Image: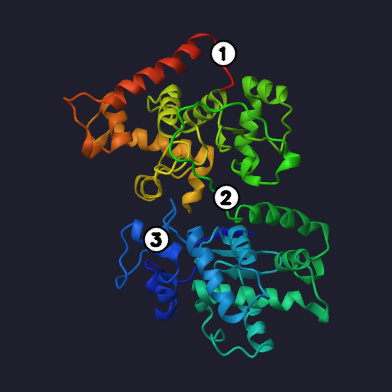
Amino acid sequence: MLLSSPATMVSFKYWDDCVDPEDLEAMWQQPAVRKEWIDVGETQGQKVHLSRDPEGQPYLTQTEMRAVAEIVTSRHFGTHIDPEMICTIAELESNRQPLAEQHDKKSKVTTVGIMQISPATAESMAKAYQISLYKIEGDPDILYRPFVNVYFGATYLKWLSNFENKVRTEEFMVRAYKGGTKKATHKSTLPYWKRYISVKETFTPRCRKHSNGPTTQAPTSTALDSSNSDDACLYWDSRVSPEDMREMWNNPEICNEWNKSNQKRGKVLFTLDSEKNPCLSRLELKAVAEIIVNNYFSTMGIKPTALCALAEMVSMRNVDGTEERTGLMGIDYSTAFRLYTEVGFRDYPIDYEEDLTKPFVSMYFGAAYFAWLSMYEGSERDLQFVIQAYISGPENVNPEGMCPEWAKFEQTLAGFEFRERNGGRCTVM
């Protein structure tokens, strides 16, 4: 099946185009949604823009998707349907695109919307549960509306949960949702279930442990015994994609260091600083910076060592950041979101502030901000301007006065470049 934009004339530019006023009000009442919308310039009482992907298709951010799922399930399904199940299926089926369509040539069935529900399934659910809230018959285009589509997707899951009057497992429900009840135990739906489990884990709220600003003492190589903690936030693999983890393991220096410290693939522990916060060693920081620059910024003249020096200054390599700054590179969510939506840096999704506590995501948007500042207001800027602007904001750069941030950056940068000149050898910390 191929995911595509709809063949119908349905088009949404604003949330107001695809939700009822009371649903939009309910969205504004969600604290996470309110913050996200206000951060990007939306105003309550005015039309709210839908986000757009690089192809111009509207989509829901993960924050918006979670809110829709929670509103629908709490209103109509109580505890019978898990909002995380809704969010995960939406991620797999449509990438949260309300106008998505898929057509199966073999079955000749077309599914639509965020939850990829077919009009026939929606009609059968409406009859089975005597649904009068939404009228599907004669108006199938209503399924493109997010609240309607999620409602019928959740209704179908409720029906599957008691298929043939038997209490069904989550695995049965998910596999049947994908392939139908006859294939709920067939090998053809097993890969979908495995992907569902993997994606659902990303919706688990991340812990965030703040330090009281950068510590004066550099992180130590305190090892964490996994038998003493089941906190997934302390593992690289909980915050880094499998693809990026493969690149880390493929780095000979990283592979050597991780093997020396008895790290296992799929369960690599972060180093902890003196405050027991997860952090990166300088070797790990250098590897992350090099991967990001080589993959996404190789033509922009950004040196990985410059990014490393910035990370050292703004976060002391702390994965969660500090009280004042978020994540490894100290990028605030609103800046990252603007870089994503307005400037076009979209290689990593940025739906939550917590996404910025993922090392590769933070490094990517740190590099993106660095690149944007280097051409601030259409003029090519020197390194000193970029560093001052990165730390204090471009409006606060003093081109003539003394800048302690620049002096500290030069000193920190020299340390990283010294290690690079010496064959890349550096202490683990």
- Labels 3 and 2: the sequence-earlier one: 3
Above/below status of 39 relative to 70: above
CA separation in Å, label 2 and label 1: 33 Å
Q: Residues within 10 Å of mark 1 (few under 14, many from 20)?
A: few
Nearest the viewer among 271 and 253 is 271
Residue beneath disc 1: 425
Amino acid bearing label 3: Lys
In this rendering, the label closer to the viewer, 2 or 1: 2
CA separation in Å, label 3 and label 2: 19 Å
Q: Residues within 10 Å of mark 3 (few under 14, many from 20)?
A: few
Amino acid bearing label 1: Arg
Judged left or right of residue 185, residue 354 is left
Residue beneath disc 2: 207
Residue 225 position by quadrant: top right
- Labels 3 and 1: the sequence-earlier one: 3
Residue 10 shows in this picture: no
Residue 2 position by quadrant: bottom right
Judged left or right of residue 11, residue 134 is right
The C terminus is located in which quarter?
Answer: top right
Residue 35's label in the rendered image is: 3
Nearest the viewer among 278 and 57 is 278
Residue drawn where x is 40% and y is 29% of the image: 313
Q: Residue furthest top?
A: 422
Residue drawn where x is 52% and y is 28% of the image: 285
Q: Position of residue 383 (x, y in %)?
A: 30, 24
Colour mapping: rainbow
Amino acid bearing label 2: Cys
- Labels 2 and 1: the sequence-earlier one: 2
